[in-house]
Amino acid sequence: MLVARTGARSRALAVTACVGALLVAGGCGQIGGAPPPDESETAEQCASLLGADAGGRIVIGMHSDQPGMNFQEDDARRSGFDYEFAKYLGEYCGMTVIEQDVSTPQRQELLQDGVVDVIVASYSITDARKLEVSFAGPYLKTKQGVMVGAGSGIESARDLAGRKVCAGRNSTSWDQMIKNLPGITAVEAEGFGECTERLLDGEIDAVTTDQVLLYGYEHEYSGLRVLPGEQFGSAELYGIGLRHGDVELCEFFNQAIKDYVHSGRWVQQFKNNLPEHLDPDDFKPVDHDLTECPDPEAEQ
Amino acid sequence: MSGRGIFAQSVRSAERKSRFSLVGGMIVVVGAAICVVAIVLEPEEGRSFVDVAAMLLSYIGLILVIQQSYTQFMDVPEPASRTAWDRVWDLATKRPRIAIAALVILILSGTYLTWYYTSASGQVVTGHITASKVTADGTGPGARPNAGSGAEPAGLTDCYPAGGRETGKRNEECAAVRIQVPGEPPARGHVDLTPVLQNEGTTGSCVSPAHIVLTPVVDGVVRPGVTGSSGHSVDVPIDNATRDAYILAEIDNQHDDAECKVTLTITRAVLHD
């Protein structure tokens, strides 16, 4: 079982709750309510693009096992940067967000089968995935990192040779681990959360995935440590997963991301949900990062 | 004319018809073969399908006209000594208006086709383009391709980190690709290139956010570059070349991802004015 760090976390939750309550009271954060008049056009456009009724529902696929990004322990309320961002998208569309749990290997399938409208689940944009899925974004940038047990004696990636290192199946982290950490014993798990549980249970020596996720875990649980300065691999660019070829929805959500970043809410939510020592600018996308929304049919 | 004379004449006529059928058949077969070859070579050599179809139809029309005219003439008894040109001349003198019209059409068509194929039309030169990776110290005006480099230069990385090409900062360690335009000098003043990038890895978003900076070097002089993206054609001016022209292609990855490595392929190249 995972052991939660309680003191600081409770205070952070209380502050977050107060800020959230103030936002709701101010009419800025209501989910599912009618959008303000100047936003009704945006909401209508979103509903039209999603093929839904204005003020209807948007089903967003999200993780629930990533502290700092999207986390739900037992029956508690969700929290995290991804979760807040998903809520923002619901507001932007003037729609009620229906939360749909997804695991890393499921994301593409649930999207293609129409179970979810969009995916907001630390979903990295890659050229290979773009053949099957369209992405708006990125809404967050990170790189690969390594997390170990606090008393493991592992100080750098070089110390990992011959050790058991875990990554999630069907994740970009798995590919990056194989490519960038030679000499390790690679261990596969259903998801990053399972890897972390095995690390805490002492079954493996290290976990590798996106740094922002690692910092979320380190912040949440005692006995875990992210190796400082160990960054490697391609940039992980988190995007909003959309059904393949949905160009207009992609452009619509790119604008939503720009508005989110420019309004200052991006930085606010980053600070609310992730460790204080992280510099938001290291993870924040700039306008020119936003990927184009190519029409697959026109590309052929 | 006696019955024996008429019989002999009809035998000669039948022989001529038979000979014509054989020659005509061979012409049709050879013409059709040329058209098929032209269609197969179309992507490489620049004849569009419409060009080839028009050529095929014209060819068949020409054969039918010749055959029709020839058949009409053979039905008329002629002295054996008369040549084909004599018969064409006779036809022309009997139908002068048609002959003059045909001559004018022939001259105009010939002039137009000559102009079209030598000056006006685009020349697809995809199969004649060579693309070679140039090392960092060889990059620049007059750079030579690396010995042994392939037709699809690989391992290309971001040349313009920290904000892209607009900042003017170039990674001097970055390798470029030299795309040699065929012809010395090239036959047209512009080349339309369709560059395609392929991510060499399974991770990273390296293709669609990347810009491809294409800088023409004409007679050794570097000209202002143009920017394109993977899968989309880009028009690069190479006008007034007197010796040769090549284009340096560099990658400008919008995400500044140093881990991105891509392969560049030129899938279509068309010279045009």
Image (spheres, coloured by chain):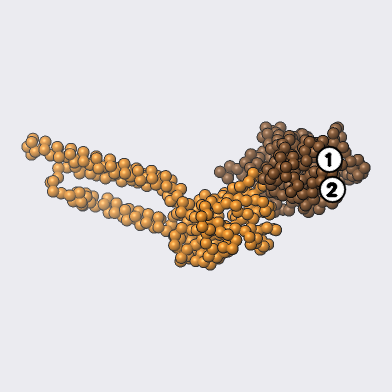
Which numbered disc flags the more N-terminal residue, 2 or 1? 1
Residue at the extreme left of the image, as rendered:
B2
Q: Chain of mark 1?
A: A
Report the disc number at residue A275: 2
Q: Which residue is mark 1?
A: A79
Give the percent coordinates (x, y) of residue A218. 83, 44
Secondary structure under tag 1 reads loop
What letter labels the chain drawn in orange? B
Identify residue type, mark 2: Pro
Residue at image point 63% right, 60% down: B173
Residue at image point 11% right, 36% down: B7
Identify residue type, mark 1: Ser
What letter labels the chain drawn in brown? A
Which sits in the foreground, B142 or B71?
Answer: B142
Q: From where the camera sits, is residue A27 visible?
A: no
**Image position of B208 with respect to B178: above or below:** above
Give the percent coordinates (x, y) of residue A93. 76, 41
